[in-house]
Amino acid sequence: MFYRKSTADLRRGDVVVFRPQGWDPAGVRANRMLRVVAVGGDAIAFAPGSAAPTLNGQPLAEPYLNGADPAPDKIRFSVAVPEGKVFLMGDNRGNSADSRYHQDVADGTVPVADVLGVVVDGSRPVFTVVPLVVMSGLLALPVAAGLGIAALVARRRAARRPAQAWPVFGAVGPVEGPQG
């Protein structure tokens, strides 16, 4: 997964990597990944019986859910998101411990300061090719170093051996030169 560390242009619909405070029962802060559904100044709400959450009084358009139920758990919430905070929900709403489940901590909102970055679309070719090239380059370095060391050792061993006469095969008896 790739993410850019800048949160300057954080907007609704972005998938973010963040480390929330107060969401983990054991007190261990772990990185999580969820989608921003509301930013500072937004009002987001859901009441059981509604088809979908509302954002600023309008039904929340969520094309990224691909036809999934936008509110399968029917958890009631109504939050005015303060400036500098975001309200986060998972795309798999039936199995996502998101802002709806942490309304006891700042109404489920997360400070933008806790957002580590915005996930970048990893399906683009550059995100497939560049890591492969880098990894192959990193693998080539030890191979090249090993071959260089092996060549150096072979040269030093050859320099230490005394010169030997090479036997000539196929000659029977003395060889006569040209008669003149």
Image (cartoon, rainbow, N blue to C red):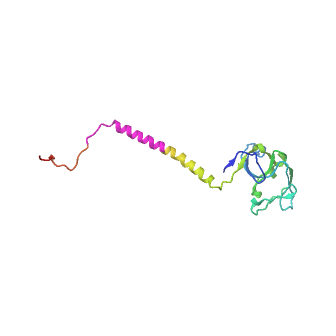
x 86%, y 61%: residue: 50
x 83%, y 60%: residue: 52
Q: Residue furthest bottom?
A: 67
- In the depicted view, which residue is nearer to us: 178 or 29? 178
Reply yes or no: does residue 152 show up in magenta: yes
Q: Residue furthest front?
A: 180
Horizontal placement of 86 versus 168: left or right?
right
Reply yes or no: does residue 176 show up in magenta: no
- In this rendering, the count of numbered labels is 0
Q: Residue furthest left?
A: 180
Assign the magenta stretch its main secondary structure: helix
Horizontal placement of 51 versus 130: left or right?
right
Residue 128 at what x, y percent from top left? Answer: 61, 53
x 76%, y 60%: residue: 63
Magenta segment, which residues? Answer: 144-165
Residue 61 at what x, y percent from top left? Answer: 80, 59
Residue 156, above or below 83: above
- In the depicted view, which residue is nearer to us: 160 or 174? 174
Residue 149 at what x, y percent from top left? Answer: 44, 40
Residue 72 at what x, y percent from top left? Answer: 80, 60
